[in-house]
Image: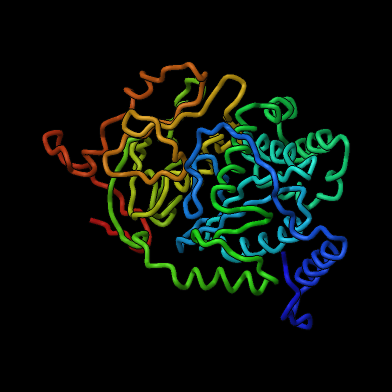
Amino acid sequence: MISPAGLDKTNMDKTQVWIVGAVLLLVVIGIGTAVYFGSTPGSGNDTSYLSDQVADNDHVTGKGGKGVLLIEYSDFQCPACGAYHPVVKQLLQKYEDDIKFVYRHFPLPQHKNARIAAYASEAAGRQGKFFEMHDLLFENQSEWSENLNARSIFSRYAVELGLDEARFASDIDDASIAAIVGDQSASGISLGVNSTPTFFLNGKKLGSPGSLEAFDALIKDAIDKAPIKEVEVAEHSHADFAVYLDGKKIDFSLAKYQSEEGKEKNEWLHLHDGNGKVIHKHKKGVFIGEFFKSLGMGFTKECFTTDTGSKYCNGSGKTLKFFVNGKTNSEFGSYEPKDLDKLVISYGPKSENPLFQLESVSDDACIYSEKCPERGPAPEESCVGGLGTSCD
C-alpha cells in the first residue's frame, strides 16, 4: 500500500497528491491495498510466466532499449491499482524507449467484476486494443466496479474503441481467455503475489513506492545499472519472407514499402531496390515487429494489421500463424530475424495447412549474404541505412 511517510507535499504534482489522497482514503475506510485470499483456476498448462521474462500470452508496451522489464500483477477493480495507474502511465511515457511494461491479471475474489473486466481487456486484445481497454477500465473504474451489469458497460467501451462488438461479445466468454487470466493469476501465486498491485522490476519484487518520484527513482536506478546490450552491434544479414492473409500474398515490391537512401522506412530493417522478398538487417537486437511498424503495419500474436488499417485477428475459426524456417514460432513481432531465415506469416482457417505458402518463400537471402556463390554474385545494393551501418 502507498505510504505517505516522508512525502514532501510541497513538491508533489497534482498526480501525486491525488494518489496519496486516494490511498489514504482507502486506509481510512479499511480497504487499502487489496489482499488475495483465494485461488484462481487456470488451464494449468502455462508455466512460462516468470518475474524477469516476457511470456507468450503477456501484453507488452514500451521498446525496452535499456533491457529493463517492469511487470505488474493487478486487478482492474482494485482501488489501489486504480491509484497507481496514472503513475505507471506517466512513467511509461517518460521511459518508453528504455523499458518494457507487462500487465498480468490477478483478479481478487472479493471484487465481483474484476474477472469479467480482465476478460474484457483480453477480448479487446484480440482486436489489437488491449492497452486501450486497460486504460479505459482504470480511468472509469468508479462507473463499473459495483455495477450489476458491468458487461454492458464494457461493450460500450468496445464500441468507443472501434472494436467489432459482436466479436468482442463472443470473445469475452471464450474459455481460452478465461484460461489466460487463470494462468496469470496462478503464476502470481507461484511468485509470492498476495496483494494488488504487485510490481516486479527486472525480476525483483518491489514494495509499494510511495510517490511518483520514488517509483521514478527505482526505474532510473535499474536503467543506470542495465548492462550494455548487444543491440549496439552492427551487422548486415538477410532473411527471406512472405505474408499471406486469407490466402492472398502481400506484394512488398510496391514502392510504398521500399526504402531509399536518405528515406529509410527503418534504418535497421528494410527492403530496397524493388525487392519485396528479402529483408535487409543492419543491426543486432532489432525485431520483425519494428520492420512492419515502419511500413505502417502491425504484427502481434493476436493480429496482423495492414497499412490500410485492415485487421486479421485470431477468432471466428481463423488464426494467425508465424513460421521460422518451416517451424511455428511463438515470438511473433518480438522475433529477431537471423541470417538466411525463411519467415512466413499466415492468416486463415485454424485447420489450414500452409505448406504451399511455406514452400513459396524465396531463397534469395543467401545470394545477398554471399553464402551461395555458385548462384552468382550478390546484386549491387543501394547504400541504405543509418548510424552503425556500412556501405560496401
Q: Measuring 55% from the left and 45% from the top, which residue is drawn there? A: 187
Task: Give the percent coordinates (x, y) of residue 292.
Answer: 48, 43
Q: Is residue 323 above or below residue 247?
A: below
Q: Left or right of 37: which side holds 61?
A: left
Q: Measuring 81% from the left and 49% from the top, which residue is drawn there? A: 141
The N terminus sits in image quarter? bottom right
Q: Quadrant of residue 8?
A: bottom right
Q: Which residue is at the front of the view, 222 or 342? A: 222
Q: Measuring 38% from the left and 54% from the top, which residue is drawn there? A: 285
Q: How is the image coloured?
A: rainbow
Task: Give the percent coordinates (x, y) of residue 304.
Answer: 53, 34
Q: Which residue is at the front of the view, 23 or 144? A: 23
Q: Is residue 315 above or below residue 377?
A: above
Task: Give the percent coordinates (x, y) of residue 78.
Answer: 76, 52
Task: Give the percent coordinates (x, y) of residue 216.
Answer: 61, 71
The C terminus sits in image quarter? bottom left
Specify whether residue 177 is in view: yes
Q: Residue furthest left?
A: 374
Q: Left or right of 185: which side holds 69?
A: left
Q: Quadrant of residue 386?
A: bottom left
Q: How many marks?
A: 0
Q: Left or right of 260: which side holds 21?
A: right
Q: Measuring 45% from the left and 45% from the top, which residue is drawn there? A: 334
Q: Is residue 299 above or below residue 173?
A: below
Q: Is residue 66 above or below residue 121?
A: below
Q: Residue furthest front?
A: 37
Specify whether residue 255 is in view: no
Q: Left or right of 350: which side holds 110?
A: right
